[in-house]
Amino acid sequence: MASKLTAKAKDADFVFLAKNKDGKRFFPDGEIYARIPEIGGLSKKRVIVLHSGSPKPNDGLVELELILQILKDRGIKPEVFFTYFPYSRQDKIFENGETNAAERLIQKIINYYEAKKIYIVDPHFGKMPWLKKYPVISICSAPLLMRKMKENSNQDVMFVSPDKGGKRRTGISGLDKKRTDSFNVDFSGTTSAFDGKVVGVIDDILATGGTLAKFYDYAEKSGAQKVIAMVTHGPFRPGIIRIKDKFPEFYLTNTINAKEANVDITDLIVKAIQK
């Protein structure tokens, strides 16, 4: 993605972390190594840290904190751009003894590391009330996914969200979803709306694929002519494979590096940081 960004943001300099003496970015015991060789030339520039919280979210967060600490030591207040925000589904306290991991991470980046703002592509917690307390810019990929699908097809598509959370984030109407346990969900809604239609379901995160697989079955039983899946983030490879095999058409952005990704978000990044 960096080379594509370079081509679209010609006035920007791209800095990458240096490797250690072994030519790697981690030590033999697995600990992360971080060094910004060009740190001396960044003090008077706008600095944006581009980060994806997958495929190794815990290692990635350690690396991100090391980067932010290096910048803080030099008095640099950066902006942080998450193509995928880790721990985003832990966005409220569900059970006694938990914490809102998503908010605490944002709080730390803003308050401790003094980041000016945070950009996030389709955060699971988009438009949650607590988010208003922080300088966070949510970037919706739904228009990009819909445009990509339309470029490949002349079909008249009915776009829907799989649940109320999707509707909250994108504004696209959805069904009522009830999770019966950690692995199973049930849907309810007006089944006649799907009869004879090509249905395009837009979701933010594809983990195990349980929600989308259940939605496919529900829409098919409701008379849908065809069901198309459009997803922003694919952090779990088995889930990607499951949905790719089940749906006749599958669109996935490259917020996380995956060979199945067929929708590029470079333009979303460039447009967001140029505003």
Image (cartoon, rainbow, N blue to C red):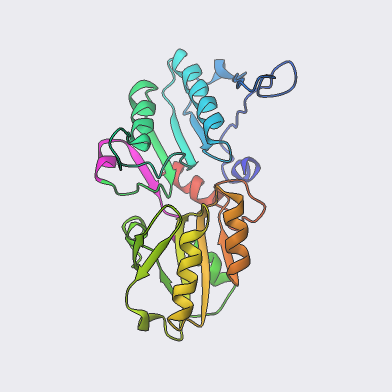
Q: Residue furthest top?
A: 73
In the rendered image, residue 147, in percent from the top left (x then y), is placed at 51, 66
Against 244, residue 225 (above or below) is below
- Taking the image as shown, residue 54 lies to the left or right of residue 117, namely right
- Taking the image as shown, residue 197 lies to the left or right of residue 106, namely right
Q: Is residue 84 magenta?
A: no
In the rendered image, residue 169, in percent from the top left (x then y), is placed at 35, 55
In which quarter of the view is residue 13 placed? top right
Residue at (45%, 33%) from the top-left corner?
80
Q: Residue furthest bottom?
A: 196
Which of the pair 132/175 is nearer the observer? Answer: 175
Position of the C terminus, as image quadrant, is top left
Q: Residue furthest front?
A: 181
Which of the pair 245/148 is nearer the observer? Answer: 245
Residue at (32%, 78%) from the top-left corner?
190
Residue at (57%, 75%) from the top-left corner?
153
In which quarter of the view is residue 195 placed? bottom left
Which span is picked out in magenta?
129-142
In the rendered image, residue 24, in percent from the top left (x then y), is placed at 71, 24
Q: How many marks?
A: 0
Position of the N terminus, as image quadrant, is top right
Q: Is residue 136 magenta?
A: yes
Which of the pair 71/42 is nearer the observer? Answer: 71
Q: Is residue 43 visible?
A: no
Q: Is residue 190 visible?
A: yes
Against 180, residue 118 (above or below) is above
In the rendered image, residue 188, in percent from the top left (x then y), is placed at 33, 71
